[in-house]
Image (cartoon, rainbow, N blue to C red):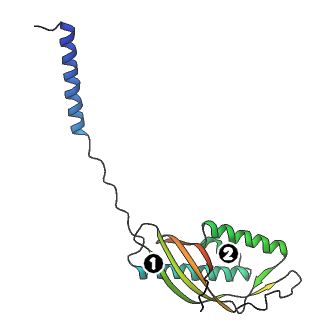
Amino acid sequence: MTLPRSKTSRFRMLALLALAASALSACTPAPEPTPTPTAAFASEEEAFAAAEEVYRAYNDALNAHRTGDDDADPYDYLTGKILDSELKTAQELEATGIHIVGPTKVVGFEGRVSDHSQSVARVVANVCLDITEARAIDDQGTDVTAADRSDTYTISVELTGAADHLLISEYEVAPGETC
């Protein structure tokens, strides 16, 4: 049995297309390998040291900003909800005419948790702050600092980001922790 000429031509054309497709696929370059994520820090100690450096720089910028240094911007060290919260607090203080004078001092930094093996790190630490010299002053120049305030307190701080760009993403007074 012979196939009609048009069916033979179709089979030849399909065979040629199949052959061409297989030849083309053999020439297609292999997909590029997906890069393995690089760890943000080589060790937990390195992550804690970087986090402490960022927090101390933030505190220095905050103190400089309080003394009128317009180039110092403590908000450069914040991100996410804590940035929003601090901006809102600053607006509320300004609206009530209260400003903070005097420095806060970092007197202790203890790394607690470090997820540093991913390209984006997360570091949690306790920071002991001495706020003895920091005072709340109203628009009349009256000291309105709470009389029963402690001069030192511990805050739990979370920093996130890459090794060269950690930012403070959360902090809160650490309940039950003392300096």
Which three-letter amino acid code belongs to the residue tagged 2?
Asp
First in sequence: mark 1 or mark 2?
A: 1
Residue 144 higher or lower than 167, as above or below: below
Name the quarter where the N terminus is drawn. top left
Residue 147 higher or lower than 54, as above or below: below
User: Few, some or many C-alpha atoms within 10 Å of disc 2 (few <14, some 14-19, many ≥20)?
Assistant: few
Which three-letter amino acid code belongs to the residue tagged 1?
Ala
Look at the numbered disc 1 and give the secondary structure of its residue.
helix
Name the quarter where the C terminus is drawn. bottom right
Q: Residue, x 57% and y 85% (percent of image)? A: 127
Instruction: Point out the frontmost of discs 1 and 2.
Output: 1
User: Few, some or many C-alpha atoms within 10 Å of disc 1 (few <14, some 14-19, many ≥20)?
Assistant: many
Q: Quadrant of residue 88?
A: bottom right
Q: Residue, x 70% and y 93% (percent of image)? A: 132
Q: Percent x, y for residue 108?
A: 56, 90
Q: Quadrant of residue 95?
A: bottom right
Q: Quadrant of residue 20?
A: top left
Q: Residue, x 55% and y 75% (percent of image)? A: 158
Q: Nearer the viewer, residue 146 or 102?
A: 146
Return the residue at label 2. 71
Q: Percent x, y for residue 138?
A: 85, 82
Q: How many numbered tags mark residues here?
A: 2
Q: Residue, x 42% and y 66% (percent of image)? A: 119
Q: Percent x, y for residue 175?
A: 61, 84
Look at the numbered disc 2 and give the secondary structure of its residue.
loop
Q: Mark 1 to mark 2: distance in Å?
A: 27 Å
Return the residue at label 1. 47
Specify the farthest residue to the right.
Answer: 140
The disc label shown at residue 149, or none: none
